[in-house]
Image (spheres, helix red, strand yellow):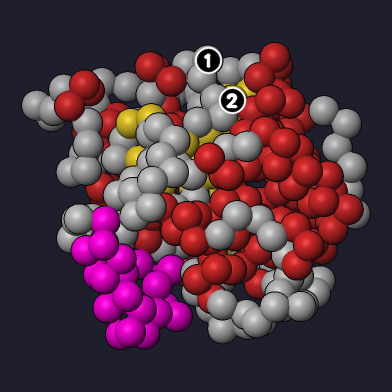
Amino acid sequence: MSDVSREDFGFETTTDDVLEGLDLGGQLALVTGGTSGLGAETARALASKGASVVITARNVPKGEEVAEGIRKTTGNANVEVEELELGSIASIRAFAERFNAKHDRLNILVNNAGVMACPFEKTSDGFEMQFGTNHLGHFLMTGLLVPALIKGAPARVVSVSSLGHERSPVVFDDIHFEKREYDKWASYGQAKTANVLFAVELDRRLKDRGVRANAIHPGVIMTELARHMVPDDLTMMRERAAARGTELKMKSVEQGAATSVYAATAPELEGRGGLYLEDVHVAEVDDRENAPGGVRSFAVDSEAARKLWTVSEEMVGQTFDF
């Protein structure tokens, strides 16, 4: 039994702390990027409380290994694996078709998969890799699953963003770095800002139908997401933390996934949306230079959120009428 009070949730809170006393039986959850790190832990935690869980994987055999591990450790047999490549519109459409044919509803969607600080690359559809995968892939996939979310209402959508969103707003006149020099961290920041803006606009569009959307910062965790990082990147992160008057503190995977699980399940968030959470609580807007946390105002700007939605529809060639 956990002795952590919900009012005391913070940096060290784990997924099991968040789920203490909750029953997710009868709920269907979808977690993208569920083969390692935060995605695998998020899926495990939700399954441990009785939710049926679908995890997406680029590598299906690896996904099946993870799913089998979750089935064994939780005693929950209802863990499925679906192939999904978020950098491919064709893969996203095929996945959504399979999911909607198999499931008539969806209660929890955790948009967790992503890439971070990779060298310049394009998706198969010609989008800059970080924006294309982290934002556009989830934008299209979520839109195609909205009918299932509405049927599953009250439903929740969680977008995994990052404090790294502070690095850049969405640069609408050069999203794909066609005119400016590519900067892997500016690209990451732009994509993570897009994750927050997407939650803001999705929540505005769906809240009257019982679907709420929030974005979260999980903290700093060394997972496969960091595979493109070099020693200089870690030094830079420590220097930025020092400039904020803090030190670079790492979380365990169980602590890192806690905020996602909290956003997906916490009773105290019922009926709330368009928010940004960190350290298992709702964060405030903070535009101070070197602010140690919080969300920058450009990431929750409703006009920018609507503009991003329209631009995203044009890019993926799909208009949503909700």
Q: Which amino acid does label 2 sit on?
A: Arg
Residue at (55%, 68%) from the top-left corner?
A: 186
Main secondary structure found in the magenta portion: helix
Q: Does 238 lie within the magenta span?
A: yes
Q: Quadrant of the C terminus?
A: top right
The correct choice, above or below, for 16 with respect to 122 in the image is above
Q: Where residue 220 sits: x, y (%)?
A: 31, 59
Q: Residues within 10 Å of mark 1 (few under 14, many from 20)?
A: some
The numbered mark, 2 or 1, whose residue comes first in the sequence reads 2
Q: Quadrant of the N terminus?
A: top left
Residue where numbered disc 1 is placed: 271
Magenta residues span: 222-244
How many angstroms separate mark 2 from mark 1 (CA)? 7 Å
- In depth, the one of 19 and 220 nearer the eye is 220
Residue where numbered disc 2 is placed: 212
- In depth, the one of 75 and 293 nearer the eye is 293
Q: Residues within 10 Å of mark 2 (few under 14, many from 20)?
A: many
Residue at (70%, 14%) from the top-left corner?
A: 208
Q: Is residue 83 left or right of residue 140?
A: left
Q: What residue type is labelled 1?
A: Gly
Spot the residue most to the front. 289
The correct choice, above or below, for 250 with respect to 121 in the image is above
Q: Does the image show residue 147?
A: yes
Q: In this view, does 43 lie to the left or right of 120?
A: left
Q: Does the image show residue 104?
A: no
The correct choice, above or below, for 274 with respect to 197 in the image is above
- In depth, the one of 78 and 136 nearer the eye is 136
Residue at (69%, 40%) from the top-left corner?
A: 305
Identify the element where label 1 is drawn: loop
